[in-house]
Image: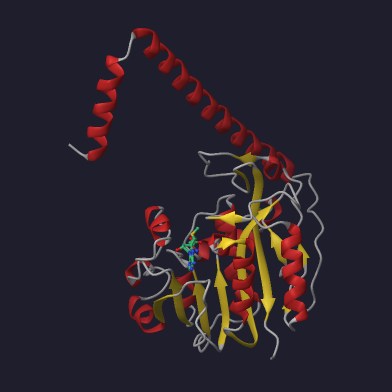
Amino acid sequence: MTARSFAVEALRRSFDRLPEGVRDDVRRSSATVRGLTQVKRNQAALALRLADLERAHRELDPEPLDERFGPGVLSRTCTQDQVESKWFRTWCEALGEEPEAHRKLWEWAYLVRTLDALDVLGPGRRGLGFGVGRESMVAFIAGRGVEVVATDLAPDAAEARLWTNADQHASGVLDDLARPELCDPEAFAERVTWRPVDMREVPDDLTGFDFCWSACAFEHLGTIDAGLDFVTASLRTLRPGGIAVHTTELNLDSDEDTIESGPTVLYRRRDIRALAARLEAEGHEVATLHLEAGTGAMDAYVDVPPYVAEPHIRLLYRNHVTTSVALVVRAGSR
Ligand SMILES: C[S@@+](CC[C@H](N)C(=O)[O-])C[C@H]1O[C@@H](n2cnc3c(N)ncnc32)[C@H](O)[C@@H]1O
């Protein structure tokens, strides 16, 4: 008997011992929860259907062009327009992922597409990934001929346990990151190294990289400031002109009230604007901020736990509506 079936059996026996009236209450509550879950699925299905209908009639929301970085490269939010773009499908497929209207997938696709557009993916280049978990991006980037240093918390760090349980932490075994369909195993072994790095203390010997990245990681450093300090420190790992792309959580409903500390913090638009100003003042170039929430049907659907596969562009995290935002920075010469 597995631990799970043992627990289920124990629960069933406890349930059978309850008075009949209490058992009826439990049955009614569980029917209500099942009903609410179905209501949520119905709404998700409606949002997808509405988005299909909109596609024929809706004009794309206008977005700026930052000539320093080129078409499509902005520091920006995930929106319906983004996950409906042709490039999104192309880059999901390149990463071996099924294209779905999911913000996490968008973060990965936007990251590699941006690095490609800025011409840093290719033989002879060096890339540094922070908090990589089990990202397929590591193998994809190595498959493009890049020498990669993939980093994450040491597996025995107290905080790493949270992510090991969630299956999002690379245990240090490179096998966890290898994807033979994205990078030939021999080339992977030659090009990829893994080392433990705490993003709160980026080591001084990590320097001269052509690019660095992190996905969905710097909001987990304990405070708003710790994440902002990490982004600044990550630029010291780059050669002049090197590219940093980092994604995080953006609070869409308040520029005041947010989660400022704890296992996950939520950045406000004003935090991102202040960070961009600070980086520009230090001589770096930050791709134009485009922090719009989007106006499509899928942008209006706010996913709540337990989350659906799609649309999952906006979600309710505690009492805040959030989405993903990517920050793109070119390192200045110091
Ligand atoms: C939500 S997971 C994202 C994993 C991966 N980047 C992805 O997109 O699937 C957060 C990651 O941040 C890492 N992380 C959390 N705190 C960290 C820290 N102080 N230093 C380095 N990595 C950290 C976790 O170990 C985990 O791999």
Question: Is residue 121 depicted above or below 132 in this figure?
Answer: below
In which quarter of the view is residue 149 placed?
Answer: bottom left
Taking depth in this image into account, of 136 and 250 the one nearest to the observer is 250
Query: Residue 177's spot in the image, x, y percent?
Result: 39, 68
Query: Residue 25's spot in the image, x, y percent?
Result: 43, 14
For the N terminus, the quadrant is: top left
Residue plotted at (24% across, 34% down): 5
In which quarter of the view is residue 325 placed?
Answer: bottom right
Residue 110 shows up from this direction: no
Residue plotted at (22% across, 33% down): 6
Query: Residue 155's spot in the image, x, y percent?
Result: 36, 66
Tell whether 88 sits left or right of 14.
right
Count the marks: how many? 0
Residue plotted at (66% across, 45% down): 321
Taking depth in this image into account, of 231 and 243 the one nearest to the observer is 231
Query: Residue 148's spot in the image, x, y percent?
Result: 46, 80
